[in-house]
Image (tube, rainbow, N blue to C red):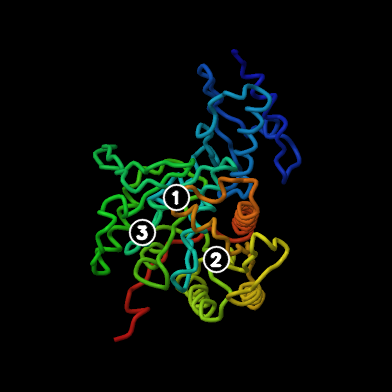
Amino acid sequence: MDFSKEQVLDALRKIIYPEKNRDIVSLGMVDDLKIEGKMISFSLLFTKPNDPFASSIRKACIQAITDHVDPEVQVRGNITIKNSGETMKKNDILPGIENIIAIASGKGGVGKSTVAVNIAVSLANKGFRVGLIDADIFGPSIPKMFNVVNIRPEVRLVDNMDLIVPIEKYGVKLLSIGFFINPDDALVWRGPMATNALKQMIEQGDWGDLDYLLVDLPPGTSDIHLTLVQEVPVTGAIIVSTPQEVALADAVKGISMFTSEKINVPILGLVENMAWFTPAELPENKYYIFGKQGCRILAENYNIELLGQIPIVERICEDGDSGKPSVMDTDSPVARSFIDLTDNLVKQVEIRNRELEPTKKVEIQRKQFYTS
């Protein structure tokens, strides 16, 4: 069925801008509204850059139009965020990316990639536009966890530049070095080769406009981490750890690296993975195999948020191996853990963007970090 601009505007009048307690249409925030068949496009105008409500209002617009105009309307991806008449740009390399989130761990084997994958899919399920870079150059696992191991990205020419088109699965745009190598081969690369691979995925990825670009980093603190903060302004970092002391000690190093004076990337919070084990036959019992509440105590000591605690569940491993992230089964308890974690992350990003200045790209010399 056909619909008019007035019907669309009536739906958008139901959305209130929190800071002024008025609807976005009466505030003049809706601009350049176009209707072509079932496709609707328009711009949202904000008076300040990096507005903390931009993502949530865009999501509300999509919901309002599908609920009150036509459930089959094509509006997702057609809403542009603008500031003072110009599209909001966070940086010159990735101008369409609103938030770049680093997901890191001090220690390997704590489930960092599992957390990254489930956050990405959960964000997409909530209506956000999401990208995920697998920056664990020497151990790329994202292709396996999305069941896209044998798929190769296309390359297209845009303005005389070859751009790599990300693979899209479950609503998430993906790039990984694993797409370009034989999965059975070991990568034997020196540091510059690895960092150049990351730069290529950032600079030549055809990412378009995204609400969140997640970067799954390798364990520890390395050239890859420094390259990321030098290439793009990182909105914030998430540190993943298990509750055991040896993992927490390495998590502290990750916190220290991001919050150091030279890097100055805010920590959005900690994620405690493998927090406890609950056997299926005793659903009320919790067994703290790797220690109890280690990340909660660490978060309190460093005055940062504990975004979530993920239990040890055999299904998480099985889902990762089968390429269907656990969060897809929204009725399961483990999916609820990842959904709650994602809700807390979105909240912390909005607080960070409201209260802190945008992160700047880091300009450093390697000799400032290494000694002979």
Secondary element under disc 1, as helix, strand or loop, is helix
Secondary element under disc 2, as helix, strand or loop, is loop
Residue 298 higher or lower than 73, as above or below: below
- Please state which amino acid type lies under the numbered disc 1: Ser
Residue 328 higher or lower than 311, as above or below: above
Front tag of 3 and 2: 3
Crowdedness near tag 1: few (<14), some (14–19) or many (≥20) residues, C-alpha within 10 Å: few
Along the line of sight, which residue is nearer the eye, 147 or 95?
A: 147
Can you say which quadrant of the picture contains the C terminus? bottom left
Identify which residue is drawn at 68% across, 34% down. Answer: 24
Residue 285 found in image quarter: bottom right
Which of disc 2 and disc 1 is earlier in sequence? Answer: 2
Query: Which residue is outermost to the right?
Result: 21
Q: Pinpoint residue 138: horizontal percent, then vertical percent.
A: 32, 64
Q: Which residue is mark 2?
A: 266
- Please state which amino acid type lies under the numbered disc 2: Pro
Q: Pinpoint residue 198: horizontal percent, then vertical percent.
A: 33, 58
Is 334 left, or right, of 180 in this rendering? Answer: right
Residue 322, numbered label: 1
The answer to whether the residue labelled 3 contacts the one labelled 2, judged by CB atoms less than 8 Å apart, is no
Q: CA distance from mark 3 to mark 2?
A: 25 Å
Along the line of sight, which residue is nearer the eye, 349 or 16?
A: 349
Secondary element under disc 3, as helix, strand or loop, is loop
Q: Pinpoint residue 180: horizontal percent, then vertical percent.
A: 27, 51
- Please state which amino acid type lies under the numbered disc 3: Pro
Q: Pinpoint residue 284: horizontal percent, then vertical percent.
A: 73, 63
Query: Which residue is outermost to the top?
Result: 1
Residue 18 higher or lower than 136, as above or below: above
Identify which residue is drawn at 60% across, 43% down. Answer: 126
Front tag of 1 and 3: 1
Q: Which residue is mark 3?
A: 140
